[in-house]
Amino acid sequence: MKVTQLTVFLENRSGRLAEVADLIGRAGINIRGFSTTEAAEYGIVRLIVTDPERARTLLHDAGFTTHFSQVLCVRVPDRPGGLAEVLDQLAAAGVSLDYLYSISFRDVCFAVRDIERAAELLAGRVTLLSDEEVRAL
Amino acid sequence: MSVTDQSHLTPDGAGGLFWQPAAETLSTPQLGELQMERLRATLENARDNIPFYREKLDELGVKSSDMGCHGDVADLPFTTKTDLRDHYPFGMFARPRDQIVRVHASSGTTGNPTTVGYTRADIEMWGDLIARTLAAGGVRPGDLLQNAYGYGLFTGGLGLHFGAERLGCTVVPISGGNTERQLKIMRDFGATALSCTPSYAMYLADAARDRGLRPDDLPIRVGFHGAEPWTNEMRALMESGLGIDALDIYGLSEMGGPGVAYECLCKAGMHVNEDHYMVEIIDPETLQPLPEGRVGELVFTTLTREAQPLIRYRTRDLCSLTYEPCACGRTSARMSKPIGRSDDMLIIRGVNVFPSQIEEVLMSIPEIEPHYQIVVDRKGYLDVIEVWVEVGEDVFAETMGDLERFQRRVQAQIYNVLNIQVAVKLKEPKAIQRSEGKAVRVVDRRKAL
């Protein structure tokens, strides 16, 4: 139940993120979710897209530095305390989080240190989305 | 021929003083005769005591007795920094180690630094040259010199120190940095003269102004600033900011350090101590001597150094010479401020840096792409180096933390080798301009100054 995340390195120059989005969009690939992080002079954008392989090839050919990694897409219970419950389980088991970001009002991307263990812990308690399910969102 | 190197402080024609009036005002024929006599002795010393020179001179078939006039020096072989590196540490010394009373070394090099050795007589000669420099700026016994050059292997600190003591000054060996304390001691001790790099003098001037100190609040009257190239625009700022006459002093560790040439209060070029160094300007491409006034590479031959005679040492500094008489009364040739280099060496806060050294470090890090650029700039009055590297897929990983760790690792490796802080900038692939022919590795934005 792991999902492929595409990460792109960007210098902080205006229009760079737009180029990424444009390139992916014109190829008919849909962005399901994304997040950006930035330092003073550069940033990284993380993408969940409907065709990560092709998106990566396109970006690579256009001169972008990219990286694939595995994340969990967790359907967080849609009620007060829903996110806390999921986080508590990981914390109690000592699984560290690198970052997380929401890809819809209820679906949240979790980048964790020990993805196997986290998937095991959460399976059956919350819905974990597959690549196919994320694409179909 | 006997020339008195007697010290006898007497006024020069520009408001300063002669330290060794006879030696500083030799007539052209007197100087020529003295130079030839000393050149012949230098060649004998080099040939008898340094295998490198024996081989070179014998190969060319040049003998010391062939040296009859200044033009004959063109028959002698050149010496380069590489020659010195190749004979590290003491292979270019003409005296056994137990006669060497001090060793300095050049700054900022990968592999072997270049070393410079001094006999007791060399140290005394150096002291006289610094005393001439200080006296030309009007410094006399009893003046208090705040010496803010770095002490250590670098020749600036100890060079100025011993010269000022020889002149009879009170020396405060404060070394560089700690601006707050510099300004406090300057006022509390009543420093009348300052020696430091020009960039640090600019920084001190700014710091004084920020603290509401006016030039009149600072007792210093004259400053001696070398080890880095600087401009007359900087002179104006230093003089108005600190209330001083700011004078340039030129030297290089290979020749023994600062004091090879210096400005008098006319501020019209640096007087070369020609009785101790024979000076030439050559075309760096054809290696042929250039006439007076033409810009070319500065070449020196030591005339009196015992421990380390150097023949036609190529400084790589580009400048011109004039033999016009100076109003101060000194008869020596004057060199213009160096306007550039005939190699790609950068001088960053007084430290010599070759782009090839940075390249070596970068190439030792396997993840780094072979494209990089070095950008030198001046922020405020301090030189800063940025090293731009492209982030390829071997470097790039998931998190900002990984990128920051990579940046810090490259910075630390460059610091370990060069002892200078650089800022590593991460760029996208192809962001660094490719060029058709020779890659543009260095962008020096300071030139706009």
Image (cartoon, coloured by chain):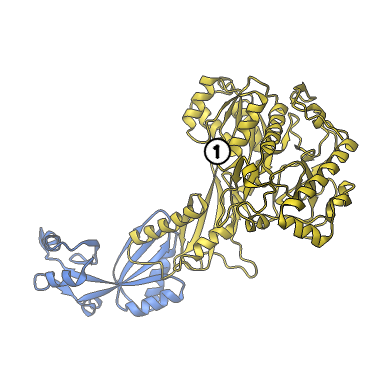
Chain colours: A blue, B yellow
Whether residue A117 can be seen here: yes
The image quarter in which residue B240 lies: top right
Vertical order, B162 against B396 (above or below): above
The answer to which of B95 and B13 lies nearer the viewer is: B95
Measured from the top left, where is residue A102 in percent x and y?
23, 64
Pick whichever, B96 or B345, lies toward us: B96
Q: Which residue is drawn at 84% across and 60% down?
A: B61
Badge 1: few (under 14), some or many (20 or more) residues near its Cα, within 10 Å?
Answer: some
The percent position of residue B20, horizontal first and vertical second, equals 77, 28
Q: Which of the two residues, B131 or A6, is positioned nearer the viewer here?
A: B131
Point out residue B139 in the picture as x, y percentages from the top left corner.
67, 24
The answer to whether residue B212 is visible is: no
Which residue lies at the image location 32% right of the left edge and 77% below the top edge?
A: A52
Numbered disc 1: what chain? B
Q: Where is the N terminus of chain B found, in terms of image quarters?
A: top right
B328 is higher (above) or lower (below) than B394: above
**In the displayed structure, would residue A41 be above or below residue B133?**
below
- Numbered marks: total: 1
* Residue B155 lies in quadrant: top right
Helix, strand or loop at mark 1: loop
Nearer to the camera, B427 or B279: B279
Q: Residue A38: x, y in percent? A: 36, 57
In what quadrant of the picture does the C terminus of chain B appear?
Answer: top right
Mark 1 sits on what residue?
B150
Q: In this view, does B149 lie to the left or right of B321?
A: left
Rendered residue at 45%/68% (across/down): B366
Residue type at mark 1: give it: Gly
Question: B280 left or right of B236?
Answer: right
